[in-house]
Amino acid sequence: MKEATPAGEPGAARATILVVEDEPLLRMAVCDSLHDAGFAAIGAADSSEAIRILHENDSVALVFSDINLPGGMNGDELAVLIRHGYPAIKILLTSGRSARVDPDFPFLAKPFFFHEMRRRIEALLGLATPLRA
């Protein structure tokens, strides 16, 4: 797990994103893509791990979560919990198997391109897309 550089220092992360995805290779690829875009990214395999991370890390600005998660709580339920317990944290849900039914949370259908994911995250956080050389 890579952590953010303290704000204001050279190389500081643009924001910290919590990626909740049960597929390990996809979770790692999403985190790598976010790191490449200047974000700090923390991975969680399920909702229980995500909740633990939120309790321990007050720098999370956005949670990007799959809807279909193993264990007790799915991504929609996790999103509701976050909205009530951490109202400042933005949420972006994703799935390749679920039709989007809850219009209260932004949704990105799988499969997605990493540049589209980053663009959606930047828009939710009100960040400008960095210029790429």
Image (spheres, helix red, strand yellow):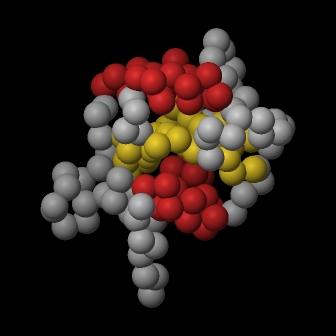
Figure disc tally: 0
Residue ranking furthest to the bottom: 133
Left or right: 87, with 24 as reference point: left
In this rendering, is residue 103 above or below 45?
A: below
Where residue 99 sits: x, y (%)? Answer: 83, 39
Q: Quadrant of residue 62?
A: top left
Q: Quadrant of residue 59?
A: top left
Q: Quarter of the image containing the N terminus? A: top left
Residue ranking furthest to the top: 72
In this rendering, is residue 47 above or below 65?
A: above
**Who is closer to the viewer here, 63 or 102?**
102
Q: Quadrant of residue 75?
A: top right
- Residue under the image location 58 percent in, 45 percent down: 92
**Who is closer to the viewer here, 45 or 131?**
131
- Residue under the image location 34 percent in, 59 percent down: 14
- Residue under the image location 62 percent in, 22 percent down: 77
Is residue 35 visible in the rendered structure shown here?
A: no
Residue ranking furthest to the front: 103
Where residue 103 sits: x, y (%)? Answer: 69, 40
Q: Quarter of the image containing the C terminus? A: bottom left
In this rendering, is residue 48 above or below 87?
A: above
Is residue 76 visible in the rendered structure shown here?
A: yes
- Residue under the image location 25 percent in, 65 percent down: 11
**Who is closer to the viewer here, 119 or 10?**
119
Left or right: 77, with 7 as reference point: right
Where residue 78 sits: x, y (%)? Answer: 57, 25
Left or right: 42, with 4 as reference point: right
Where residue 94 sits: x, y (%)? Answer: 68, 43
